[in-house]
Structure formats: structure tokens, C-alpha cells
Image: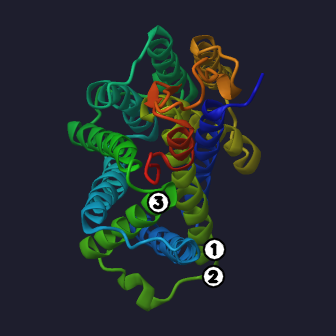
Amino acid sequence: MKINQRHYGVLFTLAAAMFFGTGAIIIKLAYRIDISSWDFLTLQYICSCAMLLPIYYLNRWRSGGAPVPRKVLGRLALQGVVGSFGGSIFLFLGFQYVGAAVGTVLFYSYPAFVTLGAILFFKEKAGLSQYSCLAITFLGTILTIDFWTVSVANTPAQGVGLIMVSALCYTFFSLYGQRNLSDSSSLEITTFTQLFAFLACIIVKPPLFLLEGISYYALFLGFVMALFTSVCSYFLLLKGMSLIGASKASIISTFEIPFTIILALIILGERLAFWQFLGAALIVGSIIYLDLAENKTEPKGGGPDGIPEESPEGPCSGDKHHIILEDHEFEDDCHRMQYAKRGSNAGCP
């Protein structure tokens, strides 16, 4: 089987889920030191901006790229403040009222919202396989976190509301991120969304804790958290999203849950029940099923990556030929390659 652009999109998204999955382990390690959740989030943003900004400007200088237009910058600010910062802060506030199990189930309802939004706003086609995977991954989530052992009768409505707002913020990040990929690269989106999330964070609560000093261990954990869950994860997620779409990427992102519990078993020594392993297997199985179902629907042509070869009339002969890639139609190979690399057709004649 040939590796095509869709396979790369799946691999990028799986890698992003694994990087996101390390966040829960790092946070548990951070709880053992004297630093609040809000201060640790601020430290994470500081470290992510310190890494991303030099990389972005060095890359732009080497490629001779132009500054980001104000209109695009405004869209990235909206995605960063609402999607990234909003998702994090509402999740943090919601977990003060609800348990981890209830909050996780509520939060991972977001793939359904992303799928619905992708159908409504981007006209993505969702078949039976995609809806089936949504249901299987949600069931797997419930099993993985041992949900039925938790009492939900006394769950505060305020906490439920905050977690759902967080899920909607992350839905917005995914959908608006897919829209921004038409004008910006994955690196550019990652850099500026993290920058604007950091600015929002310090405006809401200035980082006065830095004046009191901070341990090297806390700084190390903040750096690792930023590298894994802010820099690598968002960059890879956006790369994957540009190749397979927001809805499929959101389903595959649920791989974060089984990966996290395996890390907890290995690193933290936590014990897992049979049902949790079963739930993890369901999530992994649904991702494999989604990939196999997509293989069956790929166009079978003689060209590479399942793309039909040129028509008998010739490659050009005065008329532009059309190429179809993952439900996107392109006028020629230049547009296809630009879309595969940058998520847009910019730069083509």
C-alpha cells in the first residue's frame, strides 16, 4: 500500500494526540510542587512563545516571506484567544466543580461538534463510517475513564456548563484553524495563536508569581509541557488537519485518551481495570476502521497517491486539467502540491 497525503495526515494527527497525551502526566508531576494550575499555564505559554517566535521569524527571514497582514493577524488573534486560551481556562475552571471522569466525557463530545461544523461550514462529506467512529470513540472514552463508578447525580450544572464551553472553544479552534490554513502555514498559526493566548492570559491575571522566584524543576516542567502540548502538538494537529480535514482529525485525536492511560501505567504506576483496556482498544480500533473505510473510498487511478493520471488529451494543451484529492478539486499539480504542503493554493498561477 502506497503512503499518500491522507496517510500522512493520519500520522500527523496521531503524533499530535500523543504529544497532547503527555500533558496529563506532566500536570500530575507539577501538582507535586508548589505551583498553581494558573501559574503553570502561564509558564507554559511563556516557554512556548520563547520557542516558537525565534523559529517562526528565522524561517520567514530565510524564505523571504512577507509580514502577516493585519486581517490575517486578527483572525489568528481570535483563534488564539477564543480557541486556545478559552478552551484551556474554561476547562481549568470546570474541573474545579466536576470530577475528572465527568469532565473528560463532557469535553470529548467536541469531535461531534467539529464534525457537525465541518459539514455545515466546509461542506465536508461524513459517511456512515465516520458517524460510527464517533459513537465508538465516545463509548471507548466512557469505558476508559471508568465512568459508571462516578456519581453524576450531584454534578454541579455550573461545572458542566464550563466544560461544555471549553469543548465549544476547542471546536472553534479546530474549525477556524481549518479556515485559517487557507492563508497561513501551520507554523504561523501555531506561533501566533500561542502568542495571543499568552497575552490574554497575562491580561486576565498578571504573572506576579515570577517576581517571587520559581524553581528550576518547575521551569523544566513548564518547558516540557510547552514543547509537547503547545509547540509540537498544535503544529502537527494543524498539519494533519490540512490533509484530512477537521472532522476526521478530531476523531483521531481521541487517541490521546488510551495513550495517556498507558503512560500513567508506565510512568506513574497507576492500575487499570479490564474495562479501561477495552475502552482503549475501542478507540484505537475505531481509528483503524476509519482509515480502512477511507481506503475503500479513494479514487483508483494510475497516478501516484491514488490520483488519476492525466487525460488522453495531454497534460495541458491550452486547458487546465482537474485533480481530485480528499474531496478537494484542484486545477493542476501546482495547486495540489501547494495544498498538500501549505493547506492552500497560494503561489500558483
Q: Position of residue 114 (x, y in %)?
A: 36, 32
Q: CA distance from mark 2 to mark 3?
A: 26 Å
Residue at the disc numbered 1: 220
Q: Position of residue 64 (x, y in %)?
A: 52, 74
Image quarter hosting the N terminus: top right
Count numbered badges in the picture.
3
Helix, strand or loop at label 3? It is helix
- Sequence-wise, the earlier of marks 2 and 3 is 3
In this view of the protein, which residue sits in the foreground, 157 or 168?
A: 168
- Residue at image x 46%, y 8%? 128
Vertical placement of residue 216 versus 265, above or below = below
Residue at the disc numbered 2: 216
- Residue at image x 34%, y 29%? 118
Amino acid under disc 1 = Phe
- Residue at image x 42%, y 91%? 211
Give the left or right position of residue 256, taking residue 87 as reference.
Answer: right
Q: Disc 1 vs disc 2: Cβ atoms closer than 8 Å?
A: yes
Helix, strand or loop at label 1? It is helix
**Mark 2 or 3, which is nearer the eye?**
3
In this view of the protein, which residue sits in the foreground, 308 or 9?
A: 308
Residue at the disc numbered 3: 190
Q: CA distance from mark 1 to mark 2?
A: 6 Å
Corner quadrant of residue 333? top right
